[in-house]
Image (spheres, helix red, strand yellow):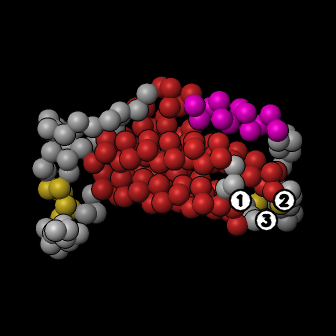
Amino acid sequence: MSLKIYTKTGDKGKTSLIGGTKVPKSDLRIDAYGTVDELNSYIGLVSDYTADPDTKTLLKEIQDRLFTVGAALACDPDKETKMRIPDLHEADIQLLESSIDKMNEELPPMKHFILPGGHVAVSTCHIARCVCRRTERLCVGMQEQEMFIEPLVLKYINRLSDYLFVLARWTGHKLGVEEIPWKPRV
């Protein structure tokens, strides 16, 4: 017997946080973890466009960490949950940083702003980066409204957007795609 995907409990615009608290689906916390879900989907697409096995492995790990981030954001910080929620570690951020450094060793220095594009794989990395930055803005908004957010979540999301930017450049480099410099009209 399969489980039904629909529960009908959200038909009136409310949903439950982990812990049972009902909130409107427009709640900033819901928006934040919904955007993490969107980001995770784009990371899957980035993975689909890469042929590099090491990058694919890291992207799967990033997707796992994004589920961790989503779970942290979905928790009611004022209630104890019976569910064991995974957590982020400083090593998760260090992994992103070491990957950034490794890719940067192969890239020419940036001398100008670049326009996203040139290849669908590069553009997809940039879209994921933009969704990551939106996630970060929502998380900062939570913090500004004094909603609890784990500091490591903010740090991880910030570093992830850096990783995605460098991944876009590195992907283009590996594909032999020239970067498109931004030439401002003056």
Residue 185, x across and y down, in percent? 85, 65
Gap in angstroms between the C-alphas marked 1 and 3: 7 Å
Tags 3 and 2 touching, CB below 8 Å: yes
Give whichever of 171, 60 is nearer the camera.
60
In front here: 168 or 185?
168
Mark 3 secondary-structure assignment:
loop
Residue drawn at 74 percent across, 38 percent down: 103
User: Three-letter amino acid code at disc 1?
Assistant: Val
Q: Which residues are magenta?
A: 95-106
Asked whether the beta carbons under mark 1 and mark 2 sit within 8 Å of each other, the answer is yes
Give the residue displayed 28% in from the left and 63% down from the top. Answer: 26
Quadrant for the N terminus in the image:
bottom left
Q: Picture quarter containing residue 47?
A: bottom right
Instruction: Name the residue type under label 3.
Output: Gly
**Residue that appears at 60% across and 48% down:** 56
Seen in the picture, residue 105 relative to 61 is either above or below; the reply is: above
**According to the image, label 3 marks what residue?**
118
The circle drawn on residue 122 is: 1
Tell me: 34 left or right of 155. left
- For marks 3 and 2, the one nearer the N-term is 3
Q: What kind of secondary structure does the magenta stretch mostly adopt?
A: helix
Disc on res. 177: 2
Residue 176 covered by magenta stretch: no
Q: Secondary structure at mark 1?
A: helix
